[in-house]
Amino acid sequence: MCLILVGYQPDSDRPLVVAANRDEFHQRASAAAEFWPQYPELLAGKDLVAGGTWLGCTQSGKFAGLTNFNQGGEAPTARSRGSLVHDFLVGDISALEYAQGLPGDEYAGYNLFLFDGNALVYTSNIEVAGCDSTQVLAPGYYALSNAELGATWPKCVTGSQNLEATVEQDFAPADLLTLLNNRQQPDDTALPQRGQPIEHERRLAPCFIVGDEYGTRACTAFILTKEQITFAEQSYAAGGVATGLVQFEFER
């Protein structure tokens, strides 16, 4: 489970604001966000198992974020989904071209937000009735978890509303990190109906997941203005205990 909340207002002083939680097994090795020595433009965390990343940006203002698409069981795949974010950010084609050229059948289920500085694109390799698998998005507020764009999971609905309320006021990266740390348990009647035991859905339902083996590993705030980028990432250990905080601010 992961969550990406996006405020996309291309004509405003802050064209793109993102608040995102990465949920993962605590034993999976990863590195906190930093500029990658081999790709000096790339700022992202790193999955030390497969070598990719779940979310990142470039100094010029490109952004990408990934969530897995829950399929009721992991499909075998020879390719890591973390490469989807990395390859877009270090490449030089538009978000739409990149999305349209992806060999989706070579990966397990995924969702992607891609921003190239001119357009925000959503793409997935899972087809769902009523949701185009690739879309150029209009200005607005969006939320992705482990289902299609527009799915009314509690963390998506509440998260998107909270992001909009935050962005409409004076705010700082710390406000986005606080928003992401919402550990409130939704009512059972609002939980996704996926044929899973109710205990499973309860455990994964909050915006911030606390667990000894699996849970929220990082909360990330990304703010893009016309002149600069602000990026903050708070890491967490088992049990939801805060560990390191990294912050970056630089001109585009």
Image: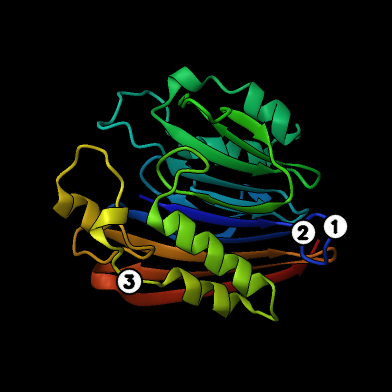
Q: Looking at the image, how many numbered discs can be counted on the residues?
A: 3
Picture quadrant of residue 176:
bottom right
Q: Secondary structure at mark 2?
A: loop
Q: Is residue 126 left or right of residue 10?
A: left
Mark 3 is on which residue type?
Answer: Gln
State left or right for residue 168 relative to residue 234. right
Query: Residue at left 61%, top 56%?
Result: 6
As drawn, 206 above or below 75: below
Q: How is the image coloured?
A: rainbow
Which residue corresponds to the image point at 50% horizontal and 38% vertical from the top-left? 111
Q: Amino acid at mark 2?
A: Pro
Q: Is residue 127 above or below residue 18?
A: above
- Image spot of residue 92 (x, y percent): 76, 35
Q: Position of residue 123 (x, y in %)?
A: 58, 33
Say whether disc 3 or disc 1 marks the residue closer to the N-terminus. 1
Q: Residues within 10 Å of mark 3 (few under 14, many from 20)?
A: few
Amino acid at pointer 1: Asp
Residue at position x 47%, y 51% in the image: 46
Question: For the residue labelled by badge 1, is the local secondary structure a helix, a strand or a loop?
Answer: loop
Cα–Cα span, label 3 and label 1: 34 Å
Name the residue tied to disc 1: 11
- Determine which residue is flagged by label 3: 184
Q: Is residue 177 left or right of residue 92?
A: left
The residue beneath circle 2 is 15
Proximity of marks 1 and 2: CB atoms separated by less than 8 Å:
yes
